[in-house]
Image (tube, rainbow, N blue to C red):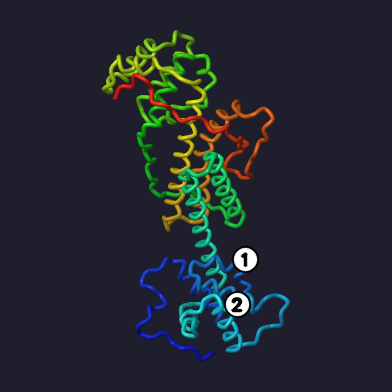
Amino acid sequence: MPHTPELSDEEPPYEPDEREPVYYAEQALLGAILLQPERLPQADGLEDDAFSHPAHGALFAAMRTVRAPGLPDPPDGLDWLRAVLEKARQEAPALTAAHLHLLISACPRPEHASTYAAMVRSGHARRSIRIHAEALAQAAQDVTVPDRPVHVLAAADALALHLDTLSRTVPAHPGSLPRTPLPRPSVSPQDDEAEDQERMLLASAVSGPASVGQMRWLAPEDFTDPLHAGLWQCVSTLAHRGESLDPVTVMWEAQHRGLLAAGVTAADLVVMLSTAALPPEHWGLQIVERALLARARHTAGRITAYTEDPANTVHQLITGGRRALADLTAIRRRWQQATRPLAEPDAPVTSRAGPASRAPVVSPPPARPLAVRAAGRTP
């Protein structure tokens, strides 16, 4: 071994007290190869970024470089270890001969190298799924992009494609659904813009009921206010029956559904439903877009929760991730139905290849004006 300075007592220890289980699998794999370099092919398919610890990745990359195919066989024994350490220190200067000794001592059985490699792959798969889920969450919160739904769905497609890629290398097994307790769906904040959009939709739908029958892509769960969701059901029901539709008839239907018992008065409803501006499709699209972003945030949180549960296998993470993305796909298809009639006739249809949606992604129409506060609104 090369003569290198040892860590002083003042320096932090190489191994913290708490490490994730995959860290010890990485140590065991590297120790096995350091002890018996001929076992390096048992880690075929691993890249240096598959290791959670940067020093481990640098050391593994050095091993592969020194033993790269096409080069002469590396020298045996201490000469090879010296060459590996010298190469690895170019990326991880803190590595020392003592570190290599620690890795060797951390390997229980070098003949189990292939099993250790599988553990490292599993840990890397878990981290990569988490990274994609975090990217989806960030996309759903990014207010700087012009077409937020398209931006979010691109991130969802990337996550779905990654899950498909992993599924080709991970064997399936029974009992594949995660048992992780799921986070509750986040309650959308009751901001003025969302409230105004929902109020204006209801009033516009009452004043122009002809469009209501074509807005089946809008669902009650898309609303942030339960009262507005119930009123939308009232409007949709009356339109479906072909009955008279005006503020008074909607108020009467709302009474039968128990909506007036929630503290809102009949006068409040009549006033709220009597002021309309712009077609109802305009406001409906605003609402379904907001719901799409909220569902994307919840989907990302759900998949992240799966990855943070160490009891889940990689196959369970893949299955649970696909199930979560399926819920996002449902609202995605409704958003596509809402935007398709408003798109330019000759506009190209763009799609991000990926199984998160089997339908194409359609670019939304140009930016629309923000909702204005309804006149005569009651608190």
Q: Indicate the secondary structure of the residue bearing disc 1.
A: loop
Q: Is residue 361 above or below residue 90?
A: above
Q: Residue furthest right?
A: 70
Looking at the rendered structure, the secondary structure element under dot 2 is: helix
The residue type indicated by label 1 comes to Gly
Q: Which residue is identified by label 2?
A: 63
Q: Nearer the viewer, residue 257 or 32?
A: 257
Instruction: Give the residue at mark 1.
Output: 45
Residue for point 38% across, 81% down: 11
Give x and y (percent) for residue 290.
46, 35
- Residue at 44% x, 87% y is 6
The extreme bottom residue here reads 3
Eyeballing the image, is 287 above or below 265?
Answer: below
Q: Position of residue 59 (x, y in %)?
A: 55, 76
Sequence-wise, the earlier of marks 2 and 1 is: 1
Residue 66 figure quarter: bottom right
Mark 2 Cα-neighbour bin, 10 Å: few <14, some 14–19, many ≥20: many
Amino acid bearing label 2: Met
